[in-house]
């Protein structure tokens, strides 16, 4: 974790740029980040008569009689596809399917290491939403869930809605639901640190893409009030007078216009940040997207989440120098990482363990509240301005999150399996700890070769 407080500006920038430089060396060294290996025993070549012909015909016939047996006989019970068209990758924009592959592989690696979930990266050579929908429908029988990733808006909303109608497995868009879940968790605890209530807080959201709209929706469902919410896109504050936004061209953004009316504000980012208790930005990569002097316009003890990747909208040291009380980014090398890595691995762990049919907003809110609770109650020292949600190193946090998600799925009637809380905990604990131990074992035994600078 970077400690930037005693560094020079040059040292801070060098630290921030190091992960990218290391990535250019280590990606070609390993030739990708995930692989497929056998998980069943091969005692001798005779075993292939069991795993393939002729023995494999028997589980095939069993699935024909009862389609749900596919969860018992195949990897479907623990495998998701991460699907992208490469049109909105990180802070890089429309870079295409091939260039999106390193991100989707990284996502697959996080799924496995943090959640014990097997994941296949699939980048599609089309930008046509109908073709994306059709492709995902066609591959869905092979997976227990679909994670849509880095698809541009507004088509990402329609793609998600159509697939959730038709697929018999959970389909979610991580840039919407995953990001929103973790941002809400961070907001809950950040507000506690500054002694302000959610229902009284003035909140400003910078950006109005898929992530920002989902964040806004989930924040309102958690306790923030619409009349205190101001959302600002590149053209200004969203309000009921925005003639360039309408139900026909971007209905989700228009809903925000009507619900919030910009908290009564008009203008651009500067006006949107005036008097705000908390600013959540999921917009254009910085630095300089948020001018440092705008922090001075915020309320006392301001909170800023600058989550653009790979570079936040404003550097943490800049915001702190202007009085920011709690600062968070989407990066793992700064304190308070509030990106979706603390969400999707555990949420899908819980979803897969009960074979849920969908992922609801209520399940996301349950995950957010559990992350906030865990940081406050289970972490030694509780929450601080430098620690508002658990980190990736806290295995038990992922287990607890998976349990509440699975429990909420059963409560809402969208789970195929009914398990006790103890059974959920044991299942999540085994899968998550097994995955981390397996990686460590492969490194120790040389099957993952050591990288030496």
Image (cartoon, rainbow, N blue to C red):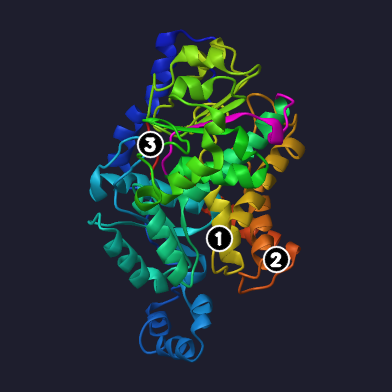
In the image shown, does 251 or 80 lie closer to the viewer?
251
Q: Which residue carries the number 2 mark?
A: 411
Mark 2 or mark 3: name the one nearer the start of the chain: 2
Q: Are marks 1 and 3 in contact (CB under 8 Å)?
A: no
Q: Is residue 398 left or right of residue 175?
A: right
Of circles 2 and 3, which is in front?
A: 2
The Cα–Cα distance between marks 1 and 3, rounded to whole angstroms, is: 38 Å
Q: Is residue 184 visible?
A: yes
User: SS class of the residue under badge 2?
Assistant: helix
Q: Where's the C terminus, which quadrant? A: top left
Picture quadrant of residue 42: bottom left
Residue at (57% x, 69% y) in the render: 355
Residue at (31% x, 68% y) in the render: 134
Q: Is residue 56 left or right of residue 100?
A: right
Q: Tell me if residue 92 comes above or below residue 141 in the rendering.
A: above
Q: Which residue carries the number 1 mark?
A: 359
Residue at (63% x, 41% y) in the render: 394
Magenta-colored span? 194-209
Q: Position of residue 420 (x, y in %)?
A: 74, 67
Q: Which residue carries the number 3 mark?
A: 451
In the image shown, does 227 or 127 lie closer to the viewer?
227
């Amino acid at each position: 974790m970077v400690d930037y407080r005693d560094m020079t500006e040059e040292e801070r920038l060098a630290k921030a740029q190091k992960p990218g430089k290391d990535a250019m060396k280590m990606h070609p060294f390993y030739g990708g980040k995930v692989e497929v290996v056998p998980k069943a025993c091969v005692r001798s070549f005779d075993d292939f008569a069991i795993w393939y012909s002729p023995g494999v015909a028997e589980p095939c016939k069993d699935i024909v009689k009862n389609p749900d047996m596919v969860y018992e006989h195949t990897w479907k019970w623990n495998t998701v596809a991460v699907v992208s068209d490469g049109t909105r990758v990180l802070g890089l924009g429309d870079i295409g399917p091939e260039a999106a592959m390193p991100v989707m592989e990284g996502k697959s690696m996080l799924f496995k290491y943090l959640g014990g979930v097997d994941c296949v990266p699939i980048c599609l050579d089309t930008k046509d939403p109908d073709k994306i929908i059709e492709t995902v429908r066609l591959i869905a029988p092979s997976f227990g869930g679909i994670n849509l990733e880095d698809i541009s808006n507004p088509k990402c909303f329609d793609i998600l809605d159509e697939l959730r109608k038709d697929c018999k497995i959970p389909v979610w868009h991580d840039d919407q639901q995953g990001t929103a879940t973790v941002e809400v968790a961070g907001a809950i605890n950040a507000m506690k640190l500054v002694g302000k209530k959610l229902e009284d807080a003035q909140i400003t959201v910078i950006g109005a893409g898929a992530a920002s709209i989902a964040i806004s929706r989930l924040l309102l469902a958690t306790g923030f009030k619409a009349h205190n919410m101001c959302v600002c896109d590149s053209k200004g504050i969203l309000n009921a007078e925005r003639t360039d936004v309408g139900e026909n061209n971007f209905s989700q953004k228009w809903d925000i216009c009507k619900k919030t009316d910009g908290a009564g504000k008009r203008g651009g980012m500067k006006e949107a940040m005036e008097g705000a208790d908390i600013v959540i930005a999921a917009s254009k990569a910085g630095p300089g997207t948020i001018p440092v002097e705008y922090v001075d316009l915020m309320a006392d003890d301001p909170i800023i989440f600058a989550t653009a990747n790979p570079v936040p909208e404003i550097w943490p040291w800049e915001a702190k120098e202007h009085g920011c009380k709690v600062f968070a980014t989407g990066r793992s090398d700064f304190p308070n990482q509030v990106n979706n890595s603390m969400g999707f691995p555990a949420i899908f762990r819980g979803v897969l363990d009960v074979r849920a049919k969908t992922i609801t907003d209520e399940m996301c809110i349950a995950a957010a509240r559990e992350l906030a609770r865990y940081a406050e109650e289970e972490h030694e020292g509780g929450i601080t301005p430098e620690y508002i949600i658990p980190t990736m190193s806290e295995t038990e946090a992922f287990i607890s999150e998976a349990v509440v998600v699975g429990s909420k799925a059963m409560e809402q009637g969208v789970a195929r399996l009914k398990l006790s809380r103890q059974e959920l905990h044991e299942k999540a604990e085994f899968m998550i700890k097994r995955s981390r131990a397996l990686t460590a074992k492969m490194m120790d035994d040389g099957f993952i070769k050591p990288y030496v600078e």
